[in-house]
Image (cartoon, rainbow, N blue to C red):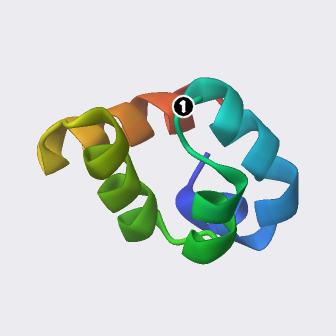
């Protein structure tokens, strides 16, 4: 799956994203409005990981959905 599909169906995918990354709040998800760069930034903040690691986690998640 590509990110365009996630962005286009953001409301549907918000729950799946929150299941994967439980430290993300509803407010976090509402503010990012489906942008992949915002998700990577929030993962960095909440989990204390490098941007490359955050982007890899997102890519791994996309490949499973």
Q: Which is more toward the observer, 62 or 19?
A: 19
Q: Where 23 falls versus 37 (above or below)?
A: above
Q: Nearer the viewer, residue 61 or 27?
A: 27
Q: Is residue 20 left or right of residue 26?
A: left
Badge 1 marks a residue whose secondary structure is loop
Task: Residue at 59% x, 26% y: name it.
Answer: 20
Image location (x, y in percent) of residue 14: 75, 50
Answer whether residue 33 is visible to the viewer in this image: no
Query: What residue is drawn where x is 64% and y is 60%?
Result: 29
Q: Position of residue 43 (x, y in %)?
A: 36, 45
Q: Which quadrant holds the N terminus?
A: top right
Residue 6 visible:
yes
- Residues packed near mark 1 inside 10 Å, few (<14), some (14 to 19) or many (20 plus): some
Residue tagged 1: 21
Quadrant for the C terminus in the image = top right
Q: Is 9 placed above or below 55 here? A: below
64 left or right of 26 in image: left
Residue 3 in the image: above or below residue 50: below
Quadrant position of residue 46: top left
């Amino acid at each position: 799956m590509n990110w365009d599909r996630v962005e286009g169906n953001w409301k549907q995918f918000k729950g799946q994203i929150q299941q994967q990354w439980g430290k993300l709040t509803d407010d976090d998800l509402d503010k990012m409005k489906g942008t992949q760069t915002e998700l990577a930034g929030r993962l960095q903040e909440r989990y204390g990981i490098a941007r490359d690691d955050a982007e890899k986690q997102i890519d791994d998640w996309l490949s499973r959905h």
